[in-house]
Image (cartoon, grey):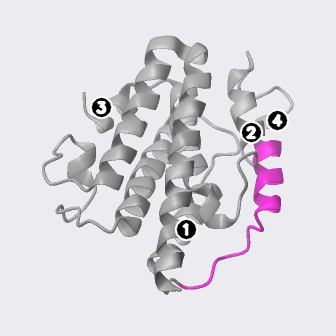
Amino acid sequence: MSLVELIAQADERGLAASGLACLDRCVPLLGGDDEILRPLWASLAEPDVWGSGGSWGDRIEQIRAKLDADAPEPALTDEDEAAVLTRRMLDAVPAEPSAAGLRTWADACSVAALQIHRLLDVADDGASCVTARREGRTDGMSPLVAAELRRQVTILELLADRGAGGLRLALVASTEGRRVLRAVVSRRARGRA
């Protein structure tokens, strides 16, 4: 099943986790540490995901404040452009999520995360856009984009199969992706020095 199909079939928790995982892997581009999104991950494990007191929205606002939600500088390098895409993911998190809002956000996060990995990959991806990748056309895919696509598919499959029980494994997959992206950015910085 393609990534597009998985997103189309996901429930609210799966959509929220999918978008959150994409953001989680890319948040180091905004200076976020490994724990910055933990409150949102924790809320996904709660019986009432969105919290009767608006805990999801409150947590998002706290995270945005910690990451200094001011508009980023205009893009100058691939890392800057990737940070702009990451900031857009964070800014678009629905404060009061609905299935339609979460689906739109998760879909946009999927595209942005793949584009970020494409920007930062030293290998040529071959495709003119990430749409082909999301629809299952993977010929000539660069390694970093391929790994990101696999993570997105894996996370949606885990949540479809296990529901809230798949959250821990989804977080593990996302954490590994964050480490990979952080290493890529570090290597690129050393290469410019």
User: According to the image, label 2 marks what residue?
Assistant: 38
Q: Residues within 10 Å of mark 3 (few under 14, many from 20)?
A: few
Amino acid, disc 4? Ser
Q: Residue at horizontal 71%, vertical 25%?
A: 49
Q: Residues within 10 Å of mark 2 (few under 14, many from 20)?
A: some
Amino acid, disc 1? Ser
Amino acid, disc 2? Arg
71 is higher (above) or lower (below) than 193: above
Q: Earlier in the sequence, mark 1 or mark 2?
A: 2
Circle 2: element type: helix
x and y percent of residue 50 in the render?
73, 29
User: According to the image, label 4 marks what residue?
Assistant: 55
Circle 4: element type: helix
x and y percent of residue 144 in the render?
35, 54
**Magenta residues (range):** 57-74
Q: Earlier in the sequence, mark 3 or mark 2?
A: 3
Q: Residue at horizontal 42%, vertical 38%?
A: 151
Horizontal side of 179 relative to 155 (left or right) equals right
| Distance in Å between CA atoms under marks 3 and 2 | 27 Å
65 is higher (above) or lower (below) than 17: below
Whether residues under marks 3 and 2 lie with C-beta atoms below 8 angstroms apart, the answer is no
User: According to the image, label 1 marks what residue?
Assistant: 186
x and y percent of residue 187 in the render?
49, 69
